[in-house]
């Protein structure tokens, strides 16, 4: 716990396991301080609450004994020590500035999105250029081959008629 905890604050919880079932498996808790201080209260459900303002050095440990009792017959009891250490907590104040266009470019996911869309745009542009080439310029290159094939057929015809 830290210097910011106030009386009534929830500190933590203790739990015990019982192999019984139903009502016999329910466990109730109580606790007493082993150091004589009454800073904490253990509730029947195992929750631990701060009861008084704390005024001791950081690193101080308070130990208390917790007793768990089940509802079985005969009732079983278990005990354990719980240590609560008082520590110094630091706080950090943060402020959020209004979003700007520079903030948008500083996010890696936005830069990656622009890069992917740019590559996709270049691929579409290359596909368009290829289709224009095949549509418009490709016909002029294929025409002479057809003419040459026709001329060869005519020459063969004339050779056949000559003999």
Image: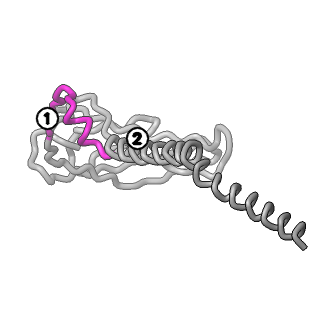
Q: Which residue is tagged 2? A: 30
- Where residue 3 appears, as percent x and y from the top left, is 15, 39
Cα separation, mark 2 vs mark 1, equals: 39 Å
Residue at 78% of width from left, 65% of height from top? 155
**Secondary structure beneath label 1:** loop
Between 106 and 2, the residue placed more toward the observer is 106
Between 104 and 76, the residue placed more toward the observer is 104
- Where residue 125 appears, as percent x and y from the top left, is 46, 43
User: What secondary structure predominates along the stretch shown in magenta?
Assistant: loop
Toward the bottom, the furthest residue is 163
Task: Give the position of the N terminus as an image quadrant.
Answer: top left
Toward the front, the furthest residue is 162
As drawn, the label of residue 93 is 1
To which quarter of the image does residue 12 belong? top left
Report the magenta residues as a range.
Answer: 91-108
Q: Is residue 150 above or below residue 57?
A: below
Residue at 80% of width from left, 62% of height from top? 153
To which quarter of the image does residue 158 belong? bottom right
Residue 104 is covered by the magenta coloring: yes
**Secondary structure beneath label 2:** strand
């Amino acid at each position: 716990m830290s210097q910011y905890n106030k009386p009534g604050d929830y500190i933590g919880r203790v739990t015990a396991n019982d192999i019984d079932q139903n009502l016999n498996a329910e466990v109730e808790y109580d606790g007493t301080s082993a150091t004589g201080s009454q800073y904490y209260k253990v509730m029947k459900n195992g929750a631990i609450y701060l009861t008084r303002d704390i005024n001791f050095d950081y690193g101080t440990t308070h130990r208390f004994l917790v007793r768990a009792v089940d509802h079985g017959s005969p009732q079983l009891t278990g005990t354990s020590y719980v240590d609560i250490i008082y520590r110094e907590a630091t706080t950090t104040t943060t402020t959020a500035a209004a979003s700007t266009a520079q903030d948008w470019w500083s996010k890696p996911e936005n830069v990656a999105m622009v890069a992917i869309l740019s590559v996709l745009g270049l691929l579409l542009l290359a596909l368009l250029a290829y289709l224009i080439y095949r549509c418009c310029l490709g016909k002029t290159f294929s025409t002479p081959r057809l003419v040459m094939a026709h001329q060869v057929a005519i020459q063969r015809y004339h050779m056949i008629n000559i003999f």
